[in-house]
Amino acid sequence: ARPTRMAFLRVATTPYSVTAPSSSPSLHAPLASRTRSLPAVGSGYHRVVASSSRAPCPRVARVVTIAQRQRAFAPSQAPRRVVQAAASGGSFASGMFEQLRARANAAMSPLSAGASAPAGRASLQGVVFTDSAPTWEALASRVTALRTQHGQSSAPPDLENGPTSTHALVRRFGTTGEPRVLLYRDSAAWCPYCQKIWMQLEEKKIPYRVEKINMRCYGDKKKSFTDRVPSGMLPVVEIDGVIITDSAAIAATIEDKFPDNNPLVPPRGTPGRERADSLNRLERALFGKWMQWLTSGWMDGTNRSAYEEVLDVVDRELAAAPGGGPYFMGPELTLVDITFTPFLERMAASLAYFKGFKMENSGGRWAALDGWFEAMAGREETYVHIKSDYYTHVHDLPPQLGGCEPNGDDEQKAFKAEIDGVRSTLSDSWRLPLAPLGPDSPEPWWLPEAPALDRLEAAAKLIGNHTAIVRFAARGCGTPGNRPVAAKLSDPTATPGEKHIPAVDAALRRVCHELLEGTAVGGGAGDVGAGAKGAELAADPAARSLAYLRDRVGVPRDMHFPAARQLRAHLNWFIDGLHA
């Protein structure tokens, strides 16, 4: 039997790692179970069983303007009354949604997230294309030149002493001795409890080693790990040879063992410690109301109101923080912020996607919380490299929870389409030209946008590991695995379509070329050599492979969010070019 203490949320879908070998687990498998663990604040967890039914993802074939998208996803200025599977009131551009509802429902098509074409698009069977892209070697040289042009170093990143990296296996922070700490964390870098300990070690600059362990929802755990930790649960830390489990116990032990490394907890018996303890209880209360709403298909308005009541308290506590914040305990980040971070991040993503609820950059409703999100985004040496994106979270949460329940209202459908990159009357978020990215975006980005650097990051990741990436992507035209796992998009035993490797290779080289040169950013179907004289590469398996890869780009493990959206959109550009 699986332990219930942390079974509710072991987030990972491992879409594909651009630094992992081609055998890295992917994401395409039926959900094996809908058993859900719901938390009760201040107590243990209670299991309930829910239906596994899911409605197909809506899709409407229409290109929209950036202005339309910005209006549609503008935050509500006042609370919205929500009834089960319906919305009332005038907030969140509900008038626009009411006018479009009939058209949207009529045009729904059961295609997958990010699917490349609306229903009725011509088949690519029999279509061929030419290889018109530079070699991988030429592309790598272009990366070097562009990095020099943008003032970036061409040297490999310093994974041991530089900014936080998902790929680092040892962190030294300028020291030379053997680290006392060994952190076992999930391979996908998405487990919220692993994230908490990871952030704590990074903020305190405690040298440590990393061993990455699969989560059960997407792969098998190493026997060497389960021999030491029979439960298999993560995270686990070994300090001076002593194994510690449970993230709360780990965090407390780290503070006790390393008091000289940027203390993140006030001393015991002080008013500051009393406030920290109270805020930690508040975090658990918010967590409980989130889980109650997210995993329930009933009493949507009641559950929303209960969640908002606790979120109001969180916002008031941030507003009342000593020194004006922006963090929970004042001007400096503490362990309280690190404790809140993994779940505030996941709440913002999941409630937008499943409930149509805009929590991050709320338009003034939770102004202090918005200030906290912005302050966290400013931690460019640490948190920026740990933070995930909405798409990754909304697809790695359900296999851990046993499912999340969409409320089916217009706002929810619009956010779902936006986050999944599905064409709809109000969204076309995974196609060029991309809308500007900033705090007012449906998924807020609090730092200055740099599209050319984002494209460079995406291209460099692919080029640097192109052999593994091509073979992984070719699973899209290969054979599904025979051993499904819980994560919907994971298929660790799938095999690539060997016959079509050259076509996939050529398509990805062209995508990298467009990312580097920026010649496709204006949008429209490009000339990718489909149907050209002498063409011999099969278009259909290439398109399916690029779509397979597109839906499995994960943040932060593969790249940062702005780079991921550029890659997803450029993959769609090539797919659309094959159909042109």
Image: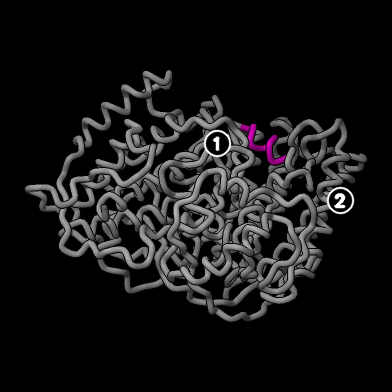
Name the residue tied to disc 2.
278
Q: Which residue is mark 1?
A: 179
Q: Which element is circle 1 on?
A: loop
Which of 142/385 is in front?
Answer: 142
**Colouring chosen for the image of the structure:** one colour
Count of labels shown? Answer: 2
Q: Position of residue 252 (x, y in %)?
A: 73, 47
Residue 158: % across, % down: 45, 28
Q: Residues within 10 Å of mark 2 (few under 14, many from 20)?
A: few
Q: Name which residue lies at 46% across and 68% down.
A: 107
Q: Give the x, y percent position of residue 431.
A: 42, 48
Determine the image quadrant of residue 440: top right
**Secondary structure of the residue carrying numbered label 2:** helix
**Secondary structure of the magenta portion, mostly?**
helix
Disc 2/disc 1 C-alpha distance (Å) = 33 Å
Q: Residue type at mark 2?
A: Ser
Range of magenta residues: 372-379
Quadrant of the image containing the N terminus: bottom right
Q: Residue at x 16, y 50 (%)?
A: 129
517, above or below 181, in the image? above
For the residue marked with disc 1, what is the amino acid? Pro
